[in-house]
């Protein structure tokens, strides 16, 4: 996959690339709604003999447009998103740097410089896509241009609901521990990748050694609590079952401590410090809480482990957790 990083003012001229069908959007999460846009793009590209492309933005527009609610953590950080797109067979990825100057562009200038200027033959977008200064450009204004055609994708609904699948809703569900809703919207198991690092090693002293995982990117983490998870050792592909605590470990720390990710793996006693791993969240078990001493903590962890083993009993370790 060729990646083109575009800025404003744009000093990259893409006159030598082939024409493409291009899906446009921020695509954080690459959830089922995003996938419907990208799948339609792929279908059109194959039908017309065009390159398959995605146009996205970095950072999230809220960093510029809504500082009180800016998103600096992501369901799929940029590098993760690019890896997923490459695996989907995308030929080109246009990454536009979203800055104050870019946000102030006249809608027509954006189209001329970045859509037509990127040799886009067909543009595929969600029904609510907007662009240009104050979002004054939309699907209807895109249809005014003769240089390319536009394909609009209707909203993708949550299972059992008419509500639109959205990254905002996924983030809300992660904040509430609604992991099954998150995984349904994503069409895969929510995951976070990172490295196993040295921790406080307190778990091993109470019979529950844990892998302390430092995430590689700025992920939006699930709410503090205990979860049934699987963990993949990325270098060897081994998938393991476990119980995970996300949070500050209030029995030992106050709330000012940075949240950590710790996974106790079932029937596993190898040292995996420095290993690249991916944690897959399957089920929320309970909120994090402060215990009155080690015995009470151990008793609860034992219950959590039993619960996680039951919840994961149908999860196959021979198939990807995606």
Image (cartoon, helix red, strand yellow):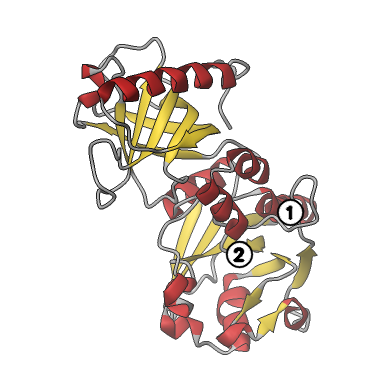
Q: Does residue 217 lie above or below 236 as drawn?
A: below
Identify the residue at horizontal 43%, vertical 38% (top origin): 225
| Residue 240 in view (yes/no) | no
Q: Nearer the viewer, residue 184 or 228?
A: 228
Q: Nearer the viewer, residue 168 or 299?
A: 299
Identify the residue at horizontal 56%, vertical 76% (top origin): 114
Q: Which mark is residue 301?
A: none
Residue tagged 1: 49
Q: Quadrant of residue 165?
A: bottom right
Q: Secondary structure at mark 2?
A: loop
Number of marks in the rendered image: 2
In this picture, residue 20 sits left or right of residue 160: left
Distance between the Cα atoms at labels 1 and 2? 22 Å
Q: Secondary structure at mark 1?
A: loop
Q: Earlier in the sequence, mark 1 or mark 2?
A: 2
| Residue 228 in view (yes/no) | yes
In this picture, residue 192 sits left or right of residue 282: left
Q: Does residue 59 lie above or below 316 as drawn?
A: below
Q: Nearer the viewer, residue 116 or 271?
A: 271
Residue tagged 2: 25
In this picture, residue 272 sits left or right of residue 141: left
Quarter of the C terminus within the rendering:
top right
Identify the residue at horizontal 25%, vertical 48% (top origin): 257
- Image coords of residue 283 (percent x, y): 56, 32
- Image coords of residue 296 (percent x, y): 33, 23
Do callouts 1 and 2 mark residues in contact (Cβ within 8 Å)?
no
In this picture, residue 45 sits left or right of residue 301: right
- Image coords of residue 51 (percent x, y): 65, 55
- Image coords of residue 87 (percent x, y): 56, 40
- Of circles 1 and 2, the one toward us is 2
Other-residue count near label 2 (Cα within 10 Å), few / some / many at <14 / 14–19 / ≥20: some
């Amino acid at each position: 996959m060729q990646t083109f990083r575009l800025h404003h003012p744009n000093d990259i001229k893409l006159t030598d690339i082939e024409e493409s069908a291009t899906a446009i959007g921020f695509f954080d999460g690459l959830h089922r709604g995003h996938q419907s846009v990208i799948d339609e793009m792929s279908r059109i590209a194959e039908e017309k003999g065009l390159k398959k492309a995605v146009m996205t933005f970095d950072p999230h527009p809220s960093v510029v447009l809504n500082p009180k609610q800016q998103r600096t953590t992501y369901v799929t950080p940029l590098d993760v998103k690019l890896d997923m797109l490459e695996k989907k067979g995308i030929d080109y990825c246009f990454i536009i740097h979203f800055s104050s100057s870019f946000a102030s562009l006249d809608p027509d200038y954006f189209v001329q410089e970045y859509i037509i200027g990127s040799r886009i033959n067909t543009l595929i977008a969600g029904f609510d896509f907007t662009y240009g200064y104050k979002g004054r450009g939309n699907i209807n204004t895109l249809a005014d241009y003769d240089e390319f055609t536009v394909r609009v994708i209707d909203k993708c609904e949550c299972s059992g609901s008419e509500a639109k699948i959205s990254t905002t809703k996924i983030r809300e569900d992660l904040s509430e521990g609604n992991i099954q809703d998150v995984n349904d919207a994503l069409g895969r198991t929510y995951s976070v990748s990172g490295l196993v690092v040295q921790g406080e090693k307190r778990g091993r002293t109470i019979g529950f050694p844990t892998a302390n995982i430092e995430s590689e990117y700025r992920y939006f983490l699930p709410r503090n609590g205990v979860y049934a998870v699987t963990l993949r050792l990325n270098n060897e592909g081994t998938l393991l079952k476990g119980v995970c605590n996300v949070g500050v470990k209030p029995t030992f720390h106050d709330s000012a401590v940075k949240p950590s990710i710790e996974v106790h793996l079932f029937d596993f006693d190898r040292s995996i410090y420095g290993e690249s791993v991916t944690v897959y969240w399957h089920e929320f078990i309970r909120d994090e809480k402060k215990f009155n001493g080690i015995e009470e903590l151990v008793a609860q962890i034992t219950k959590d482990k039993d619960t996680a083993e039951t919840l994961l009993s149908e999860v196959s370790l021979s198939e990807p957790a995606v």
